[in-house]
Image (cartoon, coloured by chain):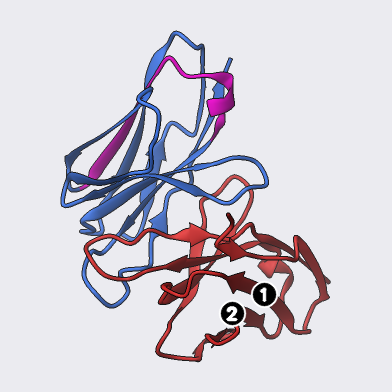
Amino acid sequence: DTEVTQTPKHLVMGMTNKKSLKCEQHMGHRAMYWYKQKAKKPPELMFVYSYEKLSINESVPSRFSPECPNSSLLNLHLHALQPEDSALYLCASSQPASGRAGEQFFGPGTRLTVL
Amino acid sequence: DQQVKQNSPSLSVQEGRISILNCDYTNSMFDYFLWYKKYPAEGPTFLISISSIKDKNEDGRFTVFLNKSAKHLSLHIVPSQPGDSAVYFCAAAVMGGATNKLIFGTGTLLAVQP
């Protein structure tokens, strides 16, 4: 299984809602990532988990809260978002070991719209 | 400050010809480079990578060239096929540790004309 899955595919939420994005991989990868991609822009790193511990937070606002319950799952909890947070949210995973550690496998993304 | 740049937002090539996508970087600490392909409504798909200890890596129709002195890399696709039409991102990283922070370029939209 070389797939990263993300649910939901699309999400529309109001500024007062609480929602969660989910990501799952079964490749045995021990590093998982959240990226945000706006239209016509490159993916921008938000968070990195390594061995289920948060290792990088790219100064992301606290209205985004990541969680890594186990080595296969990654969540992104959303609360009190702003319309400018509307974007494609991508999850990725990679092997932490040397060699092809730079190769990150991406999921299809969740298209988020904040009203 | 854009550390990884793709100066051509788009490129159009005839089927069967060579596609050359270019990427420049500014951070001399980068030691690993990757190319990703992205179709609309899908996540990026890894294509090919190169370590800074090499200057060329080939995988089927895809070849990546790295010129460290010029801080430049390029992706060659030969022969180009209509199914190659997509946005191509180059990415760079400083290897080491358990995770790698990829810095993506702005992307080049490749259109392969039948």
Where is residue A105, by image quadrant? bottom left
**Horizontal side of residue A39 vs A65, given as left or right:** right
Secondary element at image label 1: strand
Where is residue B107, by image quadrant? bottom right
Circles 2 and 1 on the same subunit: yes
Q: Chain of mark 1?
A: B
- Quadrant holding the C terminus of chain B: bottom right
What segment carries the magenta color? A72-87
- Quadrant holding the N terminus of chain B: bottom right
Which of the numbered marks, if any, corresponds to residue B22? Answer: 1
Picture coordinates of residue B78 (x, y %)? Answer: 68, 85
Q: Earlier in the sequence, mark 2 or mark 1?
A: 1
Disc 2 packing (10 Å; few <14; some 14–19; many ≥20): many
**Residue at the image point whose x is 16% and y is 52% from the top:** A51
The answer to whether B92 is drawn above or below residue A45 in the figure is below
Picture coordinates of residue B45 (x, y %)? Answer: 50, 61
Name the residue carrying label 2: B73
The answer to whether A5 is drawn above or below residue B16 in the figure is above
- Is the Cβ of the residue at disc 2 closer than 8 Å to that at disc 1? yes
**Residue at the image point whose x is 34% and y is 60% from the top:** A2
Q: Nearer the viewer, residue B11 or B97?
A: B97
Please, what is the three-letter code of the amino acid marked with disc 1? Asn
Q: Which chain is red?
A: B
- The verdict on residue A73 being magenta is yes
Please, what is the three-letter code of the amino acid marked with disc 2? Leu
Picture coordinates of residue A71 (x, y %)? Answer: 18, 48
Where is residue B70, by image quadrant? bottom right
Which of the numbered marks, if any, corresponds to residue B114? Answer: none
Color used for chain A?
Answer: blue
Disc 1 packing (10 Å; few <14; some 14–19; many ≥20): many
**Residue at the image point whose x is 29% and y is 50% from the top:** A32
